[in-house]
Amino acid sequence: MGVRKISAKKEEEALGKPIDSVIFKRLLSYFKPYKWYIVLAVSLTILISALAAVRPRLTPIAVDDMIVNKNLPGLQLIVIILFGTLVLQGIIQYAMAYLTSWIGQKIIYDLRKKIYKHTINLNLKFYDKNPIGRLVTRVTNDVEVLYEVFSSGLVTAFGDILTIVWILYFMFSLDFELTLYTLAVLPFLVYATSIFRKAVRNSYRKIRVLIANINTYIQEHITGISVVQIFGKEKRTVDEFEKINREHTEENKKSIMYYALFFPVVEFLGAAAVGLIIWYGGGQVLQNAVSVGVIIAFVQYTEMFFRPIRDLAEKYNILQTAMASSERIFNLLDTSNPVLDPVEPKPLDKIRGNIQFKNVWFAYNDEDYVLKNINFDFKEGEKVAFVGHTGAGKTTIINLINRFYDVNKGEIKIDGVNIKDINQKELRKNTGVVLQDVFLFSGDIRYNIDLGNKDITEEQINNAIDNVGLRKFINELPDGLNHKVNERGTTFSVGQRQLISFARALAYNPRILVLDEATSSVDTETEILIQNAIKKLIEGRTSIIIAHRLSTIQSCDKIIVMHKGEVKEMGNHQELLNKKGLYYKLYQLQYKEEFQNL
């Protein structure tokens, strides 16, 4: 929780910064593909603001020229013009609302696709340090915050400014002195707006951080729901969530309170401005210096004047929130992948499966090395096993072979080629991995075997199913390969999920097959199925097995014993027993436990 509090604090500080011109320009760059639609939307906004400001200007004509002179035809014409401007304004507003919403949706679609594509291609080291809930917030909540800016925020803000300009132009053209009296309340409005903007900005800042915290907490605890329920942590989890949720609710209530205070203040100042018009303008009417029609027009303009100012204050806070979301999104998009493909990758046309580790050192964090000076060679078609206590570095070896991380020192070669000179997708296409913790996607069994790869034929899928002994299980399902799989495959047993994962790896026909504790959680019958499948499939294929059960690796060509990140022993089963070293002790300890459990 300490790390999260620190990161949340940094995020909150970032949210408090003023609008960054660099970020704002970058945000505007997403308008570029739709620039002509933006030009059209701005043109429509100019028309709307002009039509809105013209209507009160017709009031003095209607009152002073037509009504006073009892010119009914002229009055009817004015009414028709007013009605026509209203209808025209409504049509244009509809077109503008549709157009800006369409633009917003297109930009949000482009941006969300870009964020997801970038995130899904970042390496595992990035995910080691970034909670999934926060990443989900970037793709969902933060992008949604930008929608209002992209759809109508900037365009309507421009329209609000134009409306104010038109209003001031017509007011000054009608009566300069009366306009100055009307604007006497403006300094108070500016001061109130400044206080409101600062208060709401701070509130929005905290709300965004709390939303990210909520997403992170929910994602983490729902993912680990089995642990929560096994250890009876439901009430504590609910209580902890209730605290985070309450903070979010209270902060939202604060922002609501600020709006509840600000809007009446604006209305009061608007009423005060009307009062000044009636007080000063009424005296001018009595002295025949100003007409009644002008006073009515000023009242109308005053009501119109305060509405866009209030809207602009709200849009500024929306823009402030959008800047914060933009900064987080751009920070994610600017995150470079430390594991990069070479500019000119060397092809792997017919990979054989020779693997070499030469003086390999690796640390997940700084120089806290989990692998130290690792050296070994795997020959094509060899069956190699890694054994050792938890934390010895066995799984790290697999991560490095797949180049999920880059080594700190030394080099890893496949068929004599440094893996840093190979395209990552090409490398991983030739490596099949079956993990202990199997992940199944929602969909059906067929999808979880071919993962949507159209190059994998039905025959390849069926061969993989037959080779791992999954046919009986598939035939017993009502829909066979089309049987629905829930998220993470929760309705299947551990053994069934592992068999599906094994079939997935084999369907891709890899030259290098990796089994990371793949049989550690299955029953004896399922383990026999897998072992029988392995015997058929390792021919001509380099196989790497990580296992705690030494009984499953006794037939391996080579066994490598790891201890605290170092290779301690290497040889086949009988050679290592004869050495009576670490492997011998592990073997004796395991069989002693098995004997005691009989």
Image (tube, grey):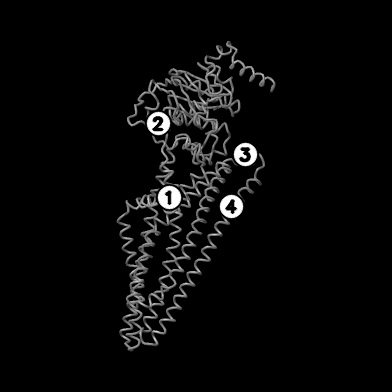
Q: Residues within 10 Å of mark 2 (few under 14, many from 20)?
A: some
Which residue position holds label 3?
A: 227
Q: Which sits earlier in the primary sequence, circle 2 or circle 3?
A: 3
**How far is mark 1 from mark 2, CA to CA?**
30 Å
**How far is mark 3 from mark 4, CA to CA?**
22 Å
Q: Residues within 10 Å of mark 4 (few under 14, many from 20)?
A: some
- Mark in front: 3 vs 4: 4
Q: Which sits earlier in the primary sequence, circle 1 or circle 3?
A: 3
Q: Residues within 10 Å of mark 1 (few under 14, many from 20)?
A: many
Which residue position holds label 4?
A: 245
**How far is mark 1 from mark 4, CA to CA?**
24 Å
**How far is mark 1 from mark 3, CA to CA?**
36 Å
- Mark in front: 1 vs 2: 1
Amino acid found under the numbered disc labelled 3: Val
Which residue position holds label 2?
A: 424
- Residue 200 sits above or below residue 51 on the image: above
Which residue position holds label 1?
A: 326
Looking at the rendered image, the quarter that the N terminus falls into is top right
Amino acid found under the numbered disc labelled 4: Asn
- Mark in front: 1 vs 3: 1
From the viewer's perspective, tell me whether residue 581 is left or right of residue 433.
Answer: right
Looking at the rendered image, the quarter that the C terminus falls into is top right
